[in-house]
Amino acid sequence: MLIAFNKPFGVLCQFTDRSQPPRPTLAGFGLPPDVYAAGRLDHDSEGLLLLTDDGGLAHRLTDPRHKQPKTYWVQVEGDPGEEALQTLRDGVDLNDGRTLPARIERLDPPSLWPRDPPVRFRKTVPDAWLAITIHEGRNRQVRRMTASVGLPTLRLVRAAIGPHRLDALQPGQWRRV
């Protein structure tokens, strides 16, 4: 079984949380029993999360050797110039090594649900949206990549993993794939 889930902002990619007070987890969304996340999305990231009850499928979806492309819609602070975009395309040096080349495109602001809490807005600082497709999945990789070229991430929504798309799923909704 494969489930596509739109993970809301502030939800952990696990079913339990031992912190006090406990944070929201996947347990609150009526997902089928015995599925687990194939990959992760940070607490402060939103969008497509795949869940499965098949360990082999989870491995094929998440192992970097299978190179499943992951596409993110990223709102960044600042107005990215061509030099910054090309640097991201070529790969950037992070503290855990150089990233693989990425596909980077400017994006019109996507039609998304409101985020709670909303992204901070500053009249004097422009922002822009990028579609970023990577073939890796390092910890907070997209945020670190954009920061490395002076474009801090304000909002990050995963739109696709391989052929699987977020489509019209709203936060907290899921469907069988």
Image (cartoon, rainbow, N blue to C red):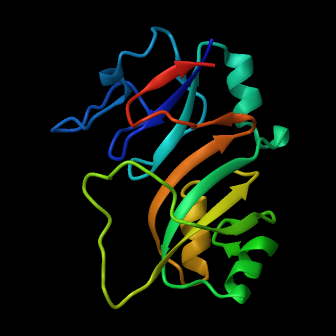
Instruction: Provide residue 148's location: percent of width, then percent of height.
Output: 59, 79
Residue 29, percent from left and from top: 34, 22
Residue pictured at 42% horizontal, 30% vertical: 14
Location of the C terminus (image quadrant) = top right
The percent position of residue 176, horizontal first and vertical second, equals: 57, 16
Q: In which image quadrant can residue 93 be found?
A: bottom right
Q: Is residue 12 above or below residue 96?
A: above
Left of 45 or right of it: where is 70?
right
Task: Give the vertical position of 119 relative to 135 (above or below).
Answer: below
Identify the residue at horizontal 75%, vertical 46% (top origin): 69
Classify the position of the N terminus by image quarter: top right
Residue 83 position, x and y percent, is: 72, 88
Which residue does the image show at 77% across and 41% down from the upper left? 68
Q: Is residue 121 visible in this depiction of the protein?
A: yes
* Name of the residue lying farthest toward the top: 33
Asked if one can make out residue 137 in the rendered structure from this viewpoint, the answer is no
Identify the residue at image location x=52%, y=57%: 110
Q: Identify which residue, 21 or 174, lies in the foreground.
A: 174
On the image, which quarter does residue 146 sit in? bottom right
Residue 24 or residue 172, whichever sits in front: 172
Q: Residue furthest left?
A: 21
